[in-house]
Image (cartoon, grey):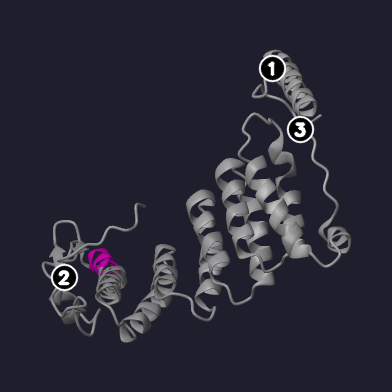
């Protein structure tokens, strides 16, 4: 009896394999196609999961990774925000879902505003996590070229407890890049005062040197221009500005050395230049 059952089982397996082979030979699994995805809202799934919402979120997350790795689905991004909103509604503290979801939205779907909406949701649901605002700042800076928005995100990230020190440096650097020189200078003074590593000390020195130069350059070149308007020529040297009462004293660079003055053009240059600004 056992031999007959085993034989029947083998025949069934062979028939199933043959039918699968015939089907596969006429089916292109990787042909481009559209797909339909329907997910109940997260709040509904919470009820339907009978208290196992974290497990349900895990299962949906694993499925989402597989689904968004299936590149022959032409319209898979139509459901992207809905899928990750559903998972994060089920498990609002699921940090990895926000990060990975934002990568898919930004790098695959190339929808930065959608990316920012998901990261903002993570920031709201996990108020002490700095990573969401930092990631948002990166996308605003790199992809949108929206520097004021990036500054706001970095400021928010830097205010979170336990945020790494490099965020404050990047915040201060972006404020400088936006030409808010006096505010940037004050921020770098604070960073310099609290610097504990060589990286922090070096970065703060370079920024303070460059920002002071740019501030001094504005003053000096403005006074040189006034001098030319009044006397019809550029001053032969910067001390002339003091002699005629246009300046009380000539500012020095951050290390206490004199700037270079070019009397033929009226321009001021420093001994060191850090060319962070392209414009």
Q: Secondary structure at mark 3?
A: loop
Task: Please tell me the numbered disc located at residue 259.
Answer: 2
Q: Residue at x 52, y 49 (%)?
A: 143
Q: Secondary structure at mark 1?
A: helix
From the top left corner, tell me how far across and down residue 110 is, in percent.
59, 43
From the top left corner, tell me how far across and down residue 172 is, in percent.
41, 72
**Mark 1 crowd level (few <14, some 14–19, many ≥20, 10 Å Cα):** few
Q: Quadrant of the N terminus?
A: top right
In this orientation, which residue lies closer to the viewer: 278 or 268? 278
Closest to the camera, between mark 2 and mark 3, is: 3
Asked if one can make out residue 180 in the rendered structure from this viewpoint, the answer is: no
Asked if one can make out residue 107 in the rendered structure from this viewpoint, the answer is: yes
Give the spatial CA distance, label 1 vs label 2: 81 Å
Residue 107 picture quarter: top right
Q: Residue at x 73, y 58 (%)?
A: 57
Q: Which residues are magenta?
A: 221-230
Please tell me whether the stretch drawn in magenta is mainly helix, strand or loop: helix
The residue singled out by tag 3 in the image is 35
């Amino acid at each position: 009896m056992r031999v007959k059952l085993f034989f029947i089982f083998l025949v069934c397996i062979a028939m199933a394999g043959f039918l699968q082979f015939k089907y596969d030979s006429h089916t292109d699994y990787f042909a481009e196609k559209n797909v339909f995805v329907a997910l109940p809202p997260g709040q509904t799934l919470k009820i339907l999961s009978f208290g196992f919402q974290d497990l349900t979120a895990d299962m949906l997350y694993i499925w989402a990774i597989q689904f968004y790795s299936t590149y022959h689905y032409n319209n898979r991004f139509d459901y992207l925000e809905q899928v990750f909103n559903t998972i994060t509604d089920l498990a609002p503290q699921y940090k990895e879902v926000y990060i990975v979801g934002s990568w898919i939205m930004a790098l695959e779907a190339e929808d930065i505003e959608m990316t920012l909406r998901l990261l903002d949701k993570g920031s709201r649901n996990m108020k002490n996590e700095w990573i969401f605002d930092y990631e948002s700042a990166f996308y605003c800076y790199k992809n949108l070229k929206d520097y004021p928005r990036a500054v706001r995100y970095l400021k928010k990230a830097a205010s979170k407890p336990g945020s790494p020190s490099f965020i404050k440096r990047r915040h201060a650097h972006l404020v400088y890049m936006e030409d808010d020189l006096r505010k940037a200078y004050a921020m770098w003074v604070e960073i310099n005062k609290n610097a504990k590593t060589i990286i922090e000390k070096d970065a703060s020195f370079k920024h303070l040197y460059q920002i002071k130069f740019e501030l001094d350059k504005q003053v000096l070149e403005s006074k040189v221009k006034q001098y030319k308007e009044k006397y019809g020529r550029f001053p032969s040297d910067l001390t002339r500005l003091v002699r005629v009462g246009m300046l009380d004293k000539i500012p020095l660079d951050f290390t206490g050395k004199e700037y270079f003055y070019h009397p033929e053009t009226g321009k001021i240059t420093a001994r060191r230049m850090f060319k962070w600004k392209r414009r």
